[in-house]
Amino acid sequence: MDEVFQALADPTRRSLLDELYRKDGQTLSALETRLPMTRFGVMKHLRILEKAGLVITQKRGREKLHFLNEVPIRLVHDRWVSKFAEPWAATLSHLKQVLEATMEKIFEIYIKTTPERLWQAITDPEMRAQYTFGLNVQSDWKTGSSYQGNSPGGLVMSGQNLEVDPPRKLVQSFNAQWSEDVKAEGTSQVTWEIEPIQDSCLLRVTHSQLREGGNNQIYGGWPMILSGLKTLLETGEHLTTPGSLHYQGR
């Protein structure tokens, strides 16, 4: 958490996050043209943001793209803003909001657990309901099979398991069903990737094949979901979020 605060303390790094908020998935060259400093200086700030988990990089051919990771900002909000520092909300709100005008969202979070336990939390209906807004997700978790997520109010999401490789990778098609507006967005794709790192795991969730400028409800809940998953596995407790309260009918 200290690394996140230190990264956000610098105005240049905040400017870089603003640029990725405006347009996600940018190269170093693109970011360099928007800041009054050398290429080396931009690289140095990006490395600090990557170390804090606020920026994620992905190789696409010969290019290295930079994406904003909202999960650490969500954790800062849940731990500090909501309880002690409400004035921070105005400063962080534009970073917490879901990015628009992009075809892909990437979220990363480190969780102190084993790959097997993390896989269980993703696929076990009772565990998943504890951090996914009370959602009951049912499937046999085999490649080519279907899955459905239901809340007390009815069907919330559905899709197909495109690739199932426990406890490392799960690729699913995704159809939002909770309103007519989100149904109109059609099918997107969600990829869960688990990478063991010593006594912890890096969980990367990539929500791709999104319509440019589409309804941000499709992917806006991921920071809350992943924060809740981390809290459950590391402490056994439930993280109260606006999403969980909504689906619990409070």
Image: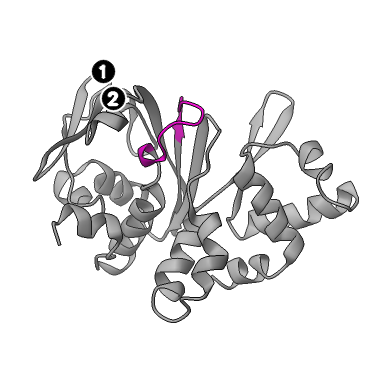
Above or below, comparing residue 227 to residue 33 in the picture: below
Residue closest to the far bottom? 84
Q: Could you tell me residue 57's position as x and y percent?
A: 64, 41
Query: What residue do we see at 63% from left, 39% from top?
Result: 23
Rendered image coloring scheme: one colour
Closest to the observer: 32 or 43?
A: 32
Instruction: State the residue lying farthest toward the top.
Output: 144
Residue marked by disc 1: 144
Apparent side of residue 36 relative to residue 127 in the rendered image (left or right)? right
Q: CA distance from mark 1 to mark 2?
A: 5 Å
Q: Which of 158 and 47 lies nearest the eye of the viewer?
A: 158
Taking the magenta stretch, the answer to whether it contains residue 209 is yes
Q: Label 1, secondary structure: give it.
A: loop
Labels 1 and 2: the sequence-earlier one:
1
Q: Nearer the viewer, residue 71 or 164?
A: 71
Could you say where residue 75 lies in the image, as x and y percent from the top left?
44, 64
Quarter-of-image position of residue 188: top left
**Front position in the image: 39 or 168:** 39
> Looking at the image, which residue is at 23% across and 52% down?
133
x then y, percent, for residue 100: 52, 38
| Whether residue 130 can be seen here | no
Mark 1 touches mark 2? (CB < 8 Å):
yes
Residue placed under numbered mark 2 in the picture: 161
At a point 39% along the width and 78% down the height, the residue shown is 83
Give the amino acid type for the residue marked by disc 1 in the picture: Gly
| In the image: residue 50, left or right of residue 153 | right
**Residue 245 lies in quadrant:** bottom left
- Judge the density around disc 1: few (<14), some (14-19), many (≥20) Cα neighbours within 10 Å: some
* Span of residues in magenta: 207-218
Query: Considering only vertical position in the picture, is 96 above or below 60?
Result: below
Could you tell me residue 174's position as x and y percent? 32, 28
Task: Find numbered disc 2 in the image and state the secondary structure of the residue it sits on.
Answer: strand
